[in-house]
Image: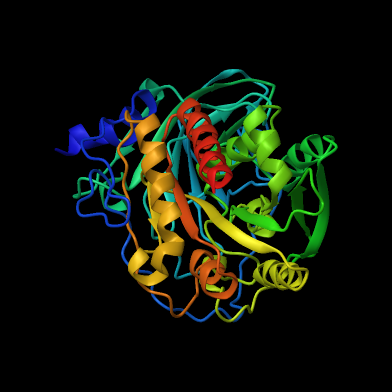
Amino acid sequence: MKLFFSYLFFFTILLTACKSTEKPVATEIKKETGYQGQPKSPVVPTVDKPVQKQWKGNWAFNDSTTFFTNDFEGARLNGVAYDGNDHYTIWITAENTPINVSPWYAFKVWTKKPREITVKLAYQDSRSRYFPKISADGIHFKAIDSTAFKGINMGESDFGIKAAPEFAEITVAIGENPIWISAQELYTSTTVKSWIDSLAAKPFISTYEIGKSKENRPMQLLEINENKKSKKALMIISRQHPPEVTGFLAMKSFIETISSNSEQAKNFRKVHTVFVVPLMNPDGVDNGHWRHNMGGIDLNRDWQNFNQPETKSVRDFLKEKDEEGYEFVFGADFHSTWDDIYYPLDTAATGAKGKIIFDWIESISKRLPQKATNVRPSKTLSPTMVSRTYFFVNHGMPAIVFELGDNTPRPFLKEKGKVAAEELMRLLNSN
């Protein structure tokens, strides 16, 4: 079973999507298939906790002919040791503890003497969750070849972090030009800002700052609207948790579809305004954090007390829009986890107002039957704590946490974001 899972965990999802055996019921999910989701989130304090910033610089080995560095946005590398025979061990530690097991890593390596080396990934109180990605330019990434990866000490479970290897070894050819090795593709604040600016070149899209992060990075917002008199609105956020890149990629496709030149999108934008905060945790992303912001806090636990500046920025923005007369008709928070799953609020808690979320899930599932639809509704409205619940309780918007799998194939992520946008526009346009 361990050998089977070691292959399944890292590669099967990359090659194919699972077949769905059931379709969701509109307002009640009686049985789920595949990934069953995470347990209920505990209530935790969100006042600042100390954060250990990683030392930034270069490590030199073999008479200063081979180098590692973490001196770039999004890097995570806390130590390197040379073990002999072209074998290196690197240590990856979290920004603080306790913390969700999302061990992010990203580093560059190069040498004056081109050759093949083996790098062992070792973690602080965690296991090897993310299958390595490699890049020659820091922009275009692909999963490392499976023959170059070796899991060490596989876990005892069939799924999740307890099934992942304790360590991992990767074998790569290095030369004089640095190569990037990372847990997921790098989408730092600089990269995201470039994407925002490219969209804002369209006449119906504007971008502005709604606040500052703990380290004074701007909280950038996109506003998509073709009719300034329209008061129906959507609120979309992403990357509360830095390593959750697949959620960002689906959100990116979702927003690009709403911003497209299709007749459906044009008609939608005449009636609806879309507000987007694509990067909720710019400090965590740029510092290579596993989970938290620079206050040492999981932002998606701070939608009750608002002790962190990032959540405060969105809270104050939404209050301002309420005062301006906007009616929020949909909210989504894009995340990543072990496999694709939806976390809506149950209609037992929301009443008929929340039914559109289930209609939306069902319509996506009909168009994408090749991927199992996993849905885990929540009936809890207090404490608000997480964004989805806050959006509904305080602003009356049907809302959802939309999670994408760590290893969901990237073309499918793009397609799912596109289909999700098209189906939402269809449902809201029909209303």
Give x and y (percent) for residue 282. Answer: 69, 55
> Farthest residue in the top direction?
114
Q: Is residue 287 left or right of residue 2?
A: right
Q: Quadrant where the N terminus lies?
A: top left
Residue shown at 56% from the left, 56% from the top: 330
The image position of residue 276, as x and y in percent, is 68, 52
Residue at the far left in the pictured view? 1
Image quadrant of residue 321?
bottom right
Above-or-below relation of 215 to 385: above
Residue furthest toward the front? 431
220 up-or-down from 115: above or below: below
Q: Position of residue 170 (x, y in %)?
A: 43, 31
The answer to whether residue 101 shows anywhere in this view is: no
* Quarter of image, res 226: top right
Rendered location of residue 206, percent (x, y): 83, 46
Residue 161 seen in this snapshot: yes
Q: Is residue 420 left or right of residue 73?
A: left
